[in-house]
Image: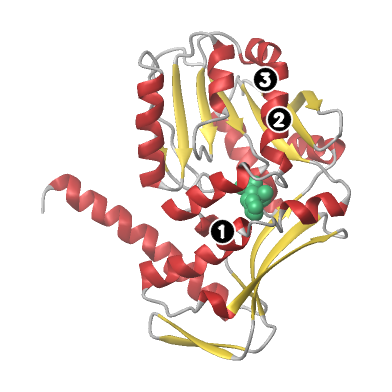
Amino acid sequence: MSHPEALRERAWTARAGAFASDLLAGLSAHPKRLPSKYFYDERGSALFERICALPEYYPTRTEMALLRTHAAEIGKLMGPGATLVEFGAGALKKVEVLLDALGRPRAYVPIDISMDFLRAMAGELRKRRPGLEVHPVAADFTNALALPVIGDGEHRVGFFPGSTIGNLEPEEAIGFLRHAATLLRGGGMLVGVDLVKDPAILHAAYNDSAGVTEAFNKNILERANSELGADFDADGFSHYAFYAPTHRRIEMHLVSRAHQTVHVLGRRFEFSEGETIHTENSRKYTVEDFSAVARRSGFVPARNWVDADRLFSLHWLEAAAD
Ligand code: AVI
């Protein structure tokens, strides 16, 4: 086996290993749970892109409108010649507004957990912007990571859109922000944060009439079947998403429609009728709550922008020089 092939295989095994051990641990827990980061294989990432275009899913279009409206001011805050680092980059669509506003960014470093999806998207971005240096990093940004060093005197700024921060548990969110503040020392980060609002709007956003969110939720089971040889019957589970006001979060679950047994990597897991697998939390913040979280993580919240309907917010956080 050639060297790059060996490296690729090792990386694949390490990722499958993490999915396998998290899946076994999650199905052994009470109540059963799975980390939402495993939604994002190639199919899951494509389904998420479809969610972003749904009429009920307001976050993407609201955040895009905020970005477009305030791009010039954000570009000035980020400064000229910056290396733009995007955490959880997905389809690399939102960043184009910032790249335009930055004029001549030094480089763009998209980080995403889905290596195949990231490579494909980075290839397309290079075609659209031939002069831009793009350095994709395939990694789980909730773990400590090292960024490529582009050159001397580099000025890094971060971009963490889409309210992905809401999918992290509070201690994970603080851990991630602390790490980001270190990586971006002397620069800053723009974070998109979904806001607390009328639960009916939230409910519709996570229970779309076309059933795309349902397919996205169930994709985690399909992924366990195709990558780890599990025998989940996706039709044996229902998509269930609701807003829990005491936690200020949408919870997504897969509810077993009947008593059933599932086999995963040589182990048996029993599901009683109505038993759930908790697959995602999507936390909503007030502007003040998020600013407090940022402050506790070593950032200085310097500026924020909210749309007229108070659906979504953007926060510019400064990272101290040391
Ligand atoms: C990626 N993340 C911010 C989305 C959210 O809204 O929490 C994931 C998602 N889950 C269901 N629909 C969208």
| Above or below 9: residue 190 | above
Q: Quadrant of the C terminus?
A: top right
Give how far across and how far down residue 227 sits, in percent: 37, 67
In three-dimensional space, the C-alpha distance between marks 3 and 1, rounded to whole angstroms, equals: 28 Å
Element at badge 3?
Answer: helix
The one of 40 and 303 positioned closer to us in this rendering: 40
Disc assigned to residue 68 = 3
Instruction: Write the residue at 57% across / 32% down.
Output: 182
Label pair 3/2, CB-CB below 8 angstroms: no
Residue 174 in view here? no
- What amino acid is found at the position of numbered circle 2 in the picture? Phe
Element at badge 2?
Answer: strand
Label pair 2/1, CB-CB below 8 angstroms: no
Q: Residue 308 occupies which quadrant of the picture?
A: top right
Estimate how packed mark 3 is, as few (under 14), some (14 to 19) or many (20 or more) residues with alpha carbons within 10 Å: some
- What amino acid is found at the position of numbered circle 1 in the picture? Phe
Instruction: Write the residue at 63% across / 88% down.
Output: 258
